[in-house]
Amino acid sequence: MCLFCQIVSGEVDAEIVLDEEHVVGFLDSRPVFKGHTLLVPREHIDTLLELPESLVVPLFTTAQRVAAVMTSALGAQGTFVAMNNVVSQSVPHLHVPVVPRTKGDGLRGFFWPRTKYEDGEAAEYGERLRSGLSDS
């Protein structure tokens, strides 16, 4: 079972920000910027090419909702939404990273520096996102 399937099943702890019928969202443990959220189909799917048509709308409308909430809940000016397939796909389970962005944040091209959460900080970011999503 892959790491993301273990997170979805609750076998591995993660800061869950969204738990829906078809999609689970959780904070990346090594975020590009704090609040960086990974959206995964609940069922194991390797890449976009294998994503069934029935899951396209739930996955991408969830990405829209999370991106919208990042501006209000985290004060982001925008977001970066992406997807790797096989190459640079750190876990072989389809995932859509939604990364909060601000002008001048230093993210350039595809160089993704990573940061860490201080103690309790991931829970704070998770709560802000959950709260924003429950209001949307």
Image (tube, rainbow, N blue to C red):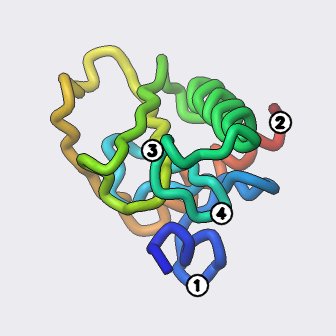
N-term mark: 1 or 2? 1
In this rendering, which labeled residue sits more in front, label 1 or label 2? 1
Looking at the picture, which amino acid does disc 1 mark? Glu
Q: Which residue is mark 4?
A: 43
Q: Mark 4 or 2, which is nearer the eye? A: 4
**Vertically, is 124 above or below 68?**
below
Q: CA distance from mark 4 to mark 2?
A: 26 Å
Residue 107 image position (x, y, % from top left)? 23, 27
Q: Position of residue 20 (x, y in %)?
A: 78, 54
The vertical placement of 34 against 118, above or below, is above
Q: Give left or right: position of 133 versus 127.
A: right
- Amino acid type shown at disc 2: Asp
Q: Residue at x 45, y 44 (%)?
A: 36
> Which residue has dot 1 on it?
11
SS for dot 3: loop
Q: Which residue is mark 2?
A: 135
Identify which amino acid the numbered label 4 is placed on: Glu
Q: Which residue is mark 3?
A: 36
Quadrant location, the C terminus: top right
